[in-house]
């Protein structure tokens, strides 16, 4: 119910206005979004680096339908990488890209358009020692995104992808992806999916996450554990010890503004921690997913960051 209601609510004119210009704006947006420009994003990357945290920067925006708009997304990512380079933080940076923002849904040749656009970003990233990760969107795009991953990795072998534990197919995808050189981000999944394709309910999704985590951690690839769930973070720690995995062979990933004290705690304990850092003007779809996950986020942000 919340998953369908909140995005509609957040799109209504009064709430949108409050989020972007009103009293909610600085509280909600500032907590979860780095700012509107590439300079804002890179300034946040620099601040995170000062605290021993890495970043994966995401330009907000999705569902682009025109090739011209998709080109605009590419240009923005190239500017972002250039600004990061100017500030000396491009090497080791990751950028998260949504293929839907790169033209995946453009009629007729969207798959080829988005793959070519992603290749432009991957080429620039690779030349600077940065990486790119393909975000995963709803189930209608999973096959296309994994196909693009295979194509991109031929020229850019560090390109990573995301799998969503809520999807029933994901254990099999993990077996397929858990190879030497792979970079796989495991998350629960942020999209409303039908029961025929997805585990329903928190318990079932967490159980699937644990199984997928076991597969990725036992393999020779580079798992990126994207969760704030205390039990799953704890399980990861146990698997690391049991499998004797070196700290450099995996990383934790958490969202900007979510459990920042836990981010610092993990980093202080010697783990690699990467913060998913969104920026850009089009923040409504992203914020609505965060509110669906945790409705208290609206209130939480209003009461300012208790966990900072
Ligand atoms: P939950 O069960 O949602 O939460 C567990 C606990 O974590 C909560 O009880 C609470 O204590 C804390 N918590 C969780 N969320 C919040 C929050 N918003 N604010 C405050 N506390 C919170 N999804 C996709 O579908 N595709 C992607 O490409 C994708 N990329 C991601 C990248 C990263 C780095 C991360 C961290 C998540 C990504 N997600 C993506 C979102 C993910 O699928 C989940 O929707 C989100 O991470 C919440 O799930 P959780 O594992 O934290 O567990």
Image (cartoon, rainbow, N blue to C red):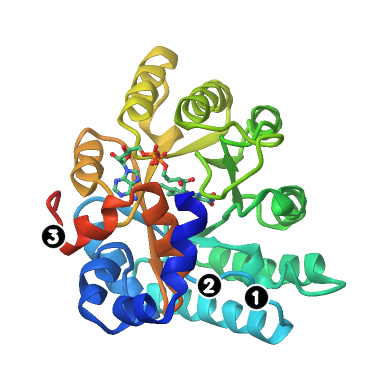
**Closer to the camera in the image, 55 or 144:** 144
Q: Which mark is residue 254?
A: none
Q: In front: mark 1 or mark 3?
A: 3
Asked if marks 2 and 1 touch (Cβ < 8 Å), the reply is yes
Q: For numbered disc 2, what is the local secondary structure?
A: loop
CA separation in Å, label 1 and label 3 = 34 Å
Q: Which mark is residue 303?
A: 3
Q: Which mark is residue 61?
A: 2
In the image, residue 229 sits, relative to residue 295, either above or below, namely above
Asked if marks 1 and 3 touch (Cβ < 8 Å), the reply is no
Say which quarter of the image contains residue 65: bottom right
Say which quarter of the image contains residue 36: bottom left
Q: At 44% across and 60% down in the image, what residue appears? A: 6
Q: At 52% across and 75% down in the image, what residue appears? A: 77
Q: For numbered disc 3, what is the local secondary structure?
A: loop
Which numbered disc flags the more N-terminal residue, 2 or 3?
Answer: 2
Total marks shown come to: 3
Q: Position of residue 92 (x, y in %)?
A: 42, 56
In the image, residue 75 sits, relative to residue 278, either above or below, namely below
């Amino acid at each position: 119910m919340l998953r369908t209601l909140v995005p509609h609510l957040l799109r209504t004119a009064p709430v949108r206005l409050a989020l972007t210009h009103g009293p909610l704006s600085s509280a909600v947006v500032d907590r979860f979004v780095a700012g509107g420009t590439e300079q804002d994003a890179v300034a946040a990357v620099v601040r995170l680096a000062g605290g021993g945290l890495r970043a994966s920067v995401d330009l907000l925006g999705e569902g682009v339908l025109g090739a011209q708009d998709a080109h605009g997304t590419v240009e923005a990512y190239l500017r972002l990488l250039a600004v990061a380079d100017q500030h000396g933080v491009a090497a080791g940076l990751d950028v998260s890209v949504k293929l839907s923002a790169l033209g995946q849904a453009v009629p007729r040749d969207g798959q080829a358009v988005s793959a070519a656009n992603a290749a432009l970003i991957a080429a620039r990233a690779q030349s600077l020692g940065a990486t790119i990760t393909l975000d995963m969107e709803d189930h209608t795009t999973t096959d296309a995104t994994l196909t693009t991953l295979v194509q991109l990795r031929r020229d850019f072998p560090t390109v990573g992808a995301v799998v969503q534990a809520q999807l029933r197919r994901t254990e099999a995808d993990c077996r397929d992806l858990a190879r030497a050189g792979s970079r796989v981000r495991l998350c629960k999944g942020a999209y409303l999916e039908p029961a025929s394709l997805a585990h329903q309910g928190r318990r079932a999704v967490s159980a699937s996450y644990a199984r997928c985590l076991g597969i990725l951690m036992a393999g020779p690839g580079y798992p990126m554990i994207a969760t704030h769930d205390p039990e799953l973070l704890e399980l990861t720690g146990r698997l690391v010890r049991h499998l004797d995995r070196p700290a450099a062979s995996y990383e934790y990933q958490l969202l900007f503004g979510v459990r920042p004290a836990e981010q610092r705690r993990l980093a202080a304990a010697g783990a690699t921690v990467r913060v998913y850092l969104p920026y850009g003007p089009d923040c409504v779809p992203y914020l609505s997913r965060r509110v669906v996950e945790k409705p208290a986020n609206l209130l939480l942000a209003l009461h300012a960051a208790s966990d900072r």
